[in-house]
Amino acid sequence: MARRKKARKTYDPLEAYRRIRRKMPPPEKVIPDKRREIGEEEAQRELRDDR
């Protein structure tokens, strides 16, 4: 005689998704884009030099 599966107490609509989805590796470290900061610093230098 086959064993019966236990009934789940709470209904989880994402249970099937969680069962089949692949585990994703953690994201890699992102190097911040400093072009905007450099452009702002250059603009401030130009304003100081013009005075």
Image: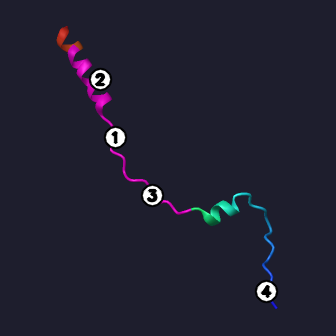
Q: Which residue is mark 3?
A: 26
Kindly identify the amino acid type of the residue bearing the numbered disc 3. Pro
Return the x and y of residue 28 as percentages of the image width and height: 38, 53
Q: Residue placed at 65% from the left, 60% from the top?
A: 17
Return the x and y of residue 33 as percentages of the image width and height: 33, 37
Residue 35, compared with residue 6, is above or below; it is: above
Kindly identify the amino acid type of the residue bearing the numbered disc 2. Glu
Q: Where does the magenta region start and end? A: 22-46
Query: In the picture, which quadrant includes the C terminus?
Result: top left
Badge 4 density bin: few <14, some 14–19, many ≥20, Cα 10 Å: few
Q: Which residue is mark 2?
A: 40
Q: Secondary structure at mark 1?
A: loop
In the image: residue 21, left or right of residue 42: right
Please report whichever mark, 1 or 4, sits nearer to the chain's N-terminal start.
Answer: 4
Badge 2 density bin: few <14, some 14–19, many ≥20, Cα 10 Å: few
Q: Residue placed at 79% from the left, 77% from the top?
A: 6
Q: Which residue is mark 4?
A: 3
Please report whichever mark, 3 or 1, sits nearer to the chain's N-terminal start.
Answer: 3
Please report whichever mark, 2 or 4, sits nearer to the chain's N-terminal start.
Answer: 4
Q: Secondary structure at mark 4?
A: loop
Q: Secondary structure at mark 2?
A: helix
In the image: residue 38, left or right of residue 23: left
> Could you give the CA–CA distance between mark 3 and mark 1, rounded to whole angstroms?
18 Å
Q: Point out the residue furthest to the top here.
A: 51
Q: Which residue is mark 1?
A: 32
**Front position in the image: 25 or 9:** 25
Please report whichever mark, 4 or 3, sits nearer to the chain's N-terminal start.
Answer: 4
Please report whichever mark, 2 or 1, sits nearer to the chain's N-terminal start.
Answer: 1
Return the x and y of residue 13 as percentages of the image width and height: 74, 57
Kindly identify the amino acid type of the residue bearing the numbered disc 4. Arg
